[in-house]
Amino acid sequence: MNNKSESNLTSIVSDVTFGYMLPSSSGDGRDLNHNGLNPNYVTGFSDGESCFFVAFQKSSECVTGWQVRAGFSLALHQRDKVLLEQIKSYFGVGEIFKQGKNAYQYKVTSTKDLINVIIPHFLKYPLITQKHADFELFKQVVCLINQKNHLTPEGILQILSIKAAMNRGLSDTLKAVFPNIKPVTRSVVEFKGISDPFWVAGFVDAEGCFMIRRLTSSTHKLGICIRLHFTITQHSRDAQLIEGLVEYFGCGNYYPSLSLDRVEFRVSKNTEINKILLFFDKYAIQGTKSADFADFKRAAELMRGKAHLTEQGLKELLLIKAGMNKGRAL
């Protein structure tokens, strides 16, 4: 796509009015939407788990030979189906589908709902990870579909050029059929800081991990050392965000892993764990990860009372650890 085409797309986007009655917040930050989800929490969770996608499917019923759909989706383990239902209720559009054996997916593909509901939400409560760049490209595709450009050969090529710059790009099948597609310019999202604690709660619900680590130790009487870790791991493209979390919480450290192309925010000092506990007591996690937080908090209380230095306390901590995260019964 040339610069003139990209300029035309910008014009198309500016000509489309996005808007609906967004849920508002009370003065203390509580969401006034009936299901209790704060709008910034929804954005934070979406920054971690959502996908803005453009799907191509061969179709003999379409003049171009291709059916094109744009959509917004969230896929979660079945244990968090209730949270998906809350998000669906928050937006008031879309459907929830079974996905595989153990997951469910919330999906919105109606162009009308994308224009009137999904896009306005993320305009008012912006994404702050590099996913924001996908959202900006997604907006362009939705506008092209809304103006029926996807029904023309030229429009198909325009949309393919945008799709090529989104997420993981074009599939091998599409590359084989359209070998000359050149991706449009994908913007790099500038990290400008974290402004809302509910965004953090949503993002941690999606990407955070509360864990109890069991380490062998020759310096401990029982031969076992217990450590509490709170972590958030992201692709290195969001390194600035992870560094920003250190500043935001006023604790923890930034750990790059260049070999894995990953970066991590980690809090492991007992003196700093309390800051994390106080934060999430005030800005609650909504999904089943809230149970992991409750166990993490219980473990911190036991360790504060030196229970980890006794045989009985150690057994209790290891029992808590065994039932957290992937060990939690459905």
Image (cartoon, rainbow, N blue to C red):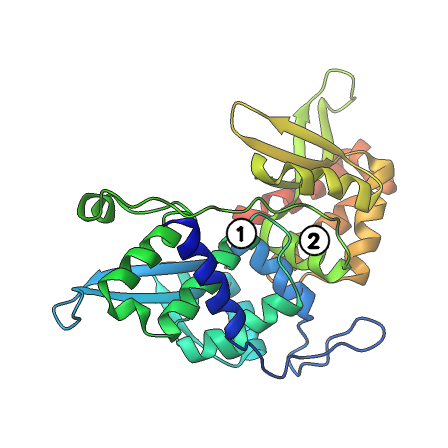
Q: Earlier in the sequence, mark 1 or mark 2?
A: 1
Residue 208 seen in this snapshot: yes
Instruction: Give the residue type that dot 2 points to.
Output: Phe
Residue that sits furthest to the top in the current view: 218
Q: Position of residue 265 (x, y in %)?
A: 69, 37
Q: Which mark is residue 293?
A: 2
How far is the residue under mark 1 from the one under mark 2?
31 Å
CB under 8 Å between discs 1 and 2 = no
Q: Residues within 10 Å of mark 1 (few under 14, many from 20)?
A: some
Identify the residue under disc 1: 133
In this view of the protein, which residue sits in the foreground, 14 or 42?
A: 14
Q: Position of residue 165 (x, y in %)?
A: 41, 47
Q: Position of residue 55 (x, y in %)?
A: 32, 60
Q: Position of residue 319 (x, y in %)?
A: 64, 44
Residue 315 seen in this snapshot: no
Q: Residue at x 57, y 54 (%)?
A: 132
> Quick check: 215 left or right of 150?
right
Helix, strand or loop under label 1: helix
In this view of the protein, which residue sits in the foreground, 150 or 85?
A: 150
Instruction: Give the residue type that dot 1 points to.
Output: Ala
Helix, strand or loop under label 2: helix
> Quick check: 158 left or right of 187?
left
Q: Residue at x 56, y 59 (%)?
A: 46
Which of labels 1 and 2 is toward the front?
Answer: 1
Q: Which mark is residue 210?
A: none
Q: Residue at x 66, y 34 (%)?
A: 213
Q: Say which quarter of the image contains residue 121.
A: bottom right
